[in-house]
Image (cartoon, rainbow, N blue to C red):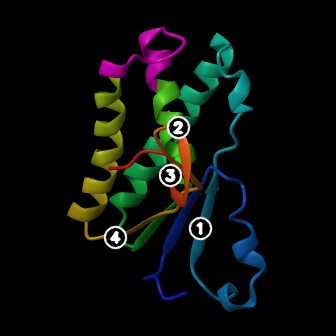
Amino acid sequence: MTLPERVVIYSFDMGAQIVRKRPEFKDKDIVIKEYPLPIIDSVQARGQQQEVRAIWDEFNKDFQKDVGDPEVKTLVIDTGTHLYEVARIARAAELGQANILQHQYGEVYARIRALIQQARLMGKSLVITHHVRDEYVDDKKTGSLEMDGCKI
């Protein structure tokens, strides 16, 4: 790994522990923070929305602490696709709604932009992984892939 150390990985995908098993990362200063998510298909229940909101709050608290820590040089969000979903569902929970309306996405985007801006202002390296999905134009697959999640 050529990222500046100490590296903090925020794992929403629950796959970051594999880093520990790779011999090339054995002696690296890597901290992994995991945020297990409930099954997203059933998040409409109020209790699960509040659970996701608590995950957002925990992640945000951890991120704020780490972005201000001079020993932390690199922040990795795995994945940005899941982070976007967590931010979206948490915002709906705050509003007491099952989903957010189109005009309410601005706050979700602002929160994610703020994370990126904070890392930049504090001189941190920031890596955000994403899932990909099929790209569609006029309801037809183009054969290409595009990033899934917030496209800021």
- Separation of marks 1 and 4 at Cα, in angstroms: 15 Å
Q: In this rendering, is residue 104 above or below 59?
A: above
At mark 1, the secondary structure is strand
Badge 1 amino acid? Val
Report the magenta residues as a range: 91-103
Q: Is disc 1 surrounded by few (<14), some (14 to 19) or many (20+) residues within 10 Å?
A: some
Q: Is disc 4 surrounded by few (<14), some (14 to 19) or many (20+) residues within 10 Å?
A: few
Badge 2 amino acid? Asp
Quadrant of the rendered image containing residue 33: bottom right
Residue at the image point whose x is 55% and y is 44% from the top: 140
The verdict on residue 101 being magenta is: yes
Instruction: Describe residue 142's horizontal placement relative to residue 45 as left or right.
Output: left
Task: Between label 3 and label 2, give the one nearer the viewer.
Answer: 2
At mark 2, the secondary structure is loop
At mark 3, the secondary structure is helix
Q: Which residue is mark 3?
A: 80
- Separation of marks 4 and 2 at Cα, in angstroms: 48 Å
Badge 4 amino acid? Pro
Q: Which residue is mark 2?
A: 139
The verdict on residue 129 being magenta is: no
Q: Which residue is mark 1?
A: 31
Q: Which residue is mark 4?
A: 70
